[in-house]
Amino acid sequence: MSDFENFIWIGSQETFIDAPNIQRFHSISVGRFGGNSSAGQNKNEDGCLIWCNEKEDWEFMILLDAHHTSESAQLILEVFQKEQIQIKDVLSEPIQDAFKKLEKRILQLFQSEEFLASCRKVTGETACLIVFRKGQYLWWFSVGDCVLYLFHEELAALGQLEVNQRQFYEWIGRVNTFEQQVPCYSRGVRELREGENRIFLTTDGLLECPNKPYSNPTNIYNSFLNSDNDKTNIMSMLEVIQNNGVKDSTTIISWKVHNSMEAVRPSE
């Protein structure tokens, strides 16, 4: 296995309609379900990109949830694949430099005239969640309503599970936040707690399933408590939403990180 690994997928190429699927990539589980054809589903407009470097101790990923067509998601995947070498150089830098330079590079890409011109030609738009974990820190950049969770027993005891907040009127594509006078997006950094941390990303099909089995993040957290087998746990979640008649597609990316560094604590 090489130090660097690359995974990329777009739902228009393989839809997983009526067919929940789990794939293990490096230490990461990728769950995909295109929705139920019996509920009227006939396409999958999700997409994702995952880069890992075990030697440098980082994972970088993009989760996309497009609508109307998958063209906007495909465009973002193509742009980042094209810029892979330059972005990897940023990811390889020391943490204190990597996070700042990554945000700057992403904004340069999304605000470039070439990218904006390409967005004007696509049909539809996409939510976009970018996540980068290096060492004991988790960095994220979000446009739209894909969700990032950080699960740890200390955080869960205080009810802290979600990292970002869903934004329902932000997109990249034909309708584009980066065409506005002031672009709207969110980003931040979280420290991992000491011990086992679970990072969990999902598109909104999981959350908006009929009967709402996973609209409460505690239910997602609890899904991993009974078994150490991530593939089994995520497949069970996909089967639950399938049995509840979900139409919308769901893509899940999840992995565990053991942090041996002492996390910050209050002075008293």
Image (cartoon, rainbow, N blue to C red):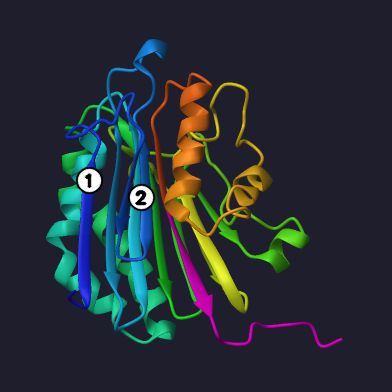
Residue occupied by mark 1: 9
Is residue 116 visible in the rendered structure shown here? no
Q: Secondary structure at mark 2?
A: strand
**Residue at x 50% of width, y 39% of height:** 236
**Residue at x 44% of width, y 84% of height:** 96
Q: Which mark is residue 30?
A: 2
Q: Main secondary structure of the magenta part?
A: loop
State which quadrant residue 120 falls in.
Answer: top left
Name the quadrant of the C terminus.
bottom right
Say whether disc 1 or disc 2 marks the residue closer to the N-terminus: 1
How many marks the image carries: the answer is 2
Question: Which tag is nearer the camera, tag 1 or tag 2?
Answer: 2
Of 106 and 239, nearer the camera is 239
197 part of magenta stretch: no
Of 235 and 199, nearer the camera is 235
Task: Locate residue 92 relative to residue 144 in the image: left or right.
Answer: left
Residue 65: percent from the left, percent from the top? 36, 38
Of 137 and 75, nearer the camera is 137
Magenta stretch: give its range. Answer: 254-268
Task: Locate residue 187 relative to residue 31 in the image: left or right.
Answer: right
Point out the residue furthest to the right here: 268
Q: Secondary structure at mark 1?
A: strand
Q: Is residue 150 above or below residue 189?
A: above
